[in-house]
Image (cartoon, grey):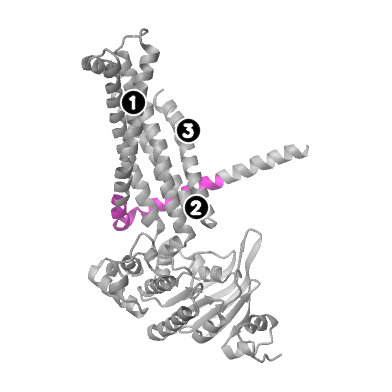
Amino acid sequence: MIVLRDVSKRFGSQIVLDGVNLDVQEGETLALLGPSGTGKSVLLKHIIGLIRPDRGIVVVDDEEVGKLKRKDLAALRSRIGYVFQNGALFDSMNVLENVRLGITDGEKYRDESYARQRVIECLKLVNLNPDLVMEKFPAELSGGMRKRVGIARAIAGSPKYLLYDEPTSGLDPVNADVIDSLVKRLDNELGVTSVMVTHDVRGAFRTADRLALLTGGKIVQQGTQEEFLASQNPKVQEFLERDFPDATFAA
Amino acid sequence: MNAQTLDLRRFVGRWTLDAMSHVGRVSLLVWDAIKSLAEWRVWLPRTFTEAWNIGVGSLFIVLLISGFAGAVTALQARYQFTGTIPIYYLAGVIVESIVLELGPVLTGLVLAGRIGARYAAELGTMRVTEQIDALESLGRSPASHLILPRVLAGLIMIPVLVILADVMGIFAGWFSMTMVLPITNEDFTYGARSFWRPFDATYSVIKAFFFAASITIIACYMGFNTKQGAEGVGRATTGAVVASSVLILLLDVLLANLLLS
């Protein structure tokens, strides 16, 4: 379970997060919505300890992330798969080596045959043909393929949690749908707990069990799709209006 | 107290705080790298790759520059000293100039441009494209994967390059002298030996070692702390070259004062 309590973060004079409270239950997929530049990715990076809060606590599996020592933090991170916005694949490595780095267990990582088999398995899970892509370098892949390789790397270590940072941004609608279906399928097949940062409301409605809206540094609404559509909060209505123009808000 | 005095005090204060902050963060980076020494399975193979890249990639430019430096030193020594001191003294002047100063400093400055810029740009690009964050998110240490191999490769290969530069500079100096002056090989060797102390070679390597540390650590630090996209990468790269070149010159004075007094 992931718990955030009163998490605040500022960069210089800009307050990015201002007392965020959020719970992510075991096995659920939570979509974190919000306009661009509201700190969704910053929030996600707090969960994995890439950014530390100025105030408040982040707890994953009963461990307070900010207080973990280097070794314990590495152990926690090995249970979390993180899908970066632009893939963040290592340009000097081919797809095989990139995905292999996702195998967080040292013994398994060093076992050549296991590692190769696991990479093939993960590439197939994200609908990529291992024979075609395994020897390619990130620069030789399309944007959609890079995102899928990024997902393959994130699941290679069989994580308990998956954090997606804008998995569909920059993709055309067809490829975005492919990624959304992939996220949904992986969540079902692997039984992981997922947090997906996105500003694509339709994609979030297709994939997530629950949604949270981050705006002005605060979570202004969280709940199911029905609760979102029924919300009287003007910020929620404003955010949903573009994607659901025909929706009749409770107000 | 007028506004200008206040401004100056504020400027000096801010500059001092910035400098202290950099020193602190460089120390933390080095400490992180030291703590990663236990992860030898990670850094050892990468160190060999980096060492190969530094050694083979820089050999030509290092030999070229030291060769020309040796030749020019010989020609200028002829211009300055012919007719004033015995001609075999010039061999001593050339060998000592190259081993004590020109070999290590010119090699250091060339490598600050070549290796320093490369490391800062590589790590800076990895930072702004979130590759370093990705490495951390996979529970892996950037220090053992990225910093330690680069620093160790520099500490191993830069002294080797300086030794080769010294040899090349002396060879070029000897060749130039024998081409333009009536000096025999025996006279050259006699002159060189007259001024030579075994510590001179050690001093050259000690300098190379310090220069290697400053080039690699500053470049890794600058690259690792890159911000703001492509512009930031450019700034980190330039900053790494300028800072390590200045530090090389400062270390040159400091080491001469400490070790040759």
Q: Position of residue B170 (x, y in %)?
A: 29, 25
Same subunit: marks 1 and 3: yes
- Residue placed at 66% from the left, 87% from the top? A231
Question: Residue B15, which numbered label?
Answer: none
Q: How many C-alpha atoms fall within 10 Å of the one at disc 2: few (<14), some, or many (≥20)?
A: many
Q: Secondary structure at mark 2?
A: helix
Write down the residue under mark 2.
B233
Q: Quadrant of residue A21?
A: bottom right
Can residue A246 be seen?
A: yes
Q: Chain ID for label 1? A: B
- Residue placed at 34% from the left, 62% from the top? A93
- Of the 4 image quadrants, the one containing the N terminus of chain B is top right
Badge 1 or badge 3: first in the primary sequence: 1
Write down the residue under mark 3.
B250
Q: Quadrant of residue B71?
A: top left
Q: Position of residue A206 (x, y in %)?
A: 51, 86
Write down the region rendered in magenta: B20-48
Q: Position of A191 compared to B187: left or right?
A: right
Mark closer to the observer (3, 2) = 2
Q: Amino acid at mark 3?
A: Leu
Q: Chain ID for label 2? A: B
Q: Amino acid at mark 2?
A: Val
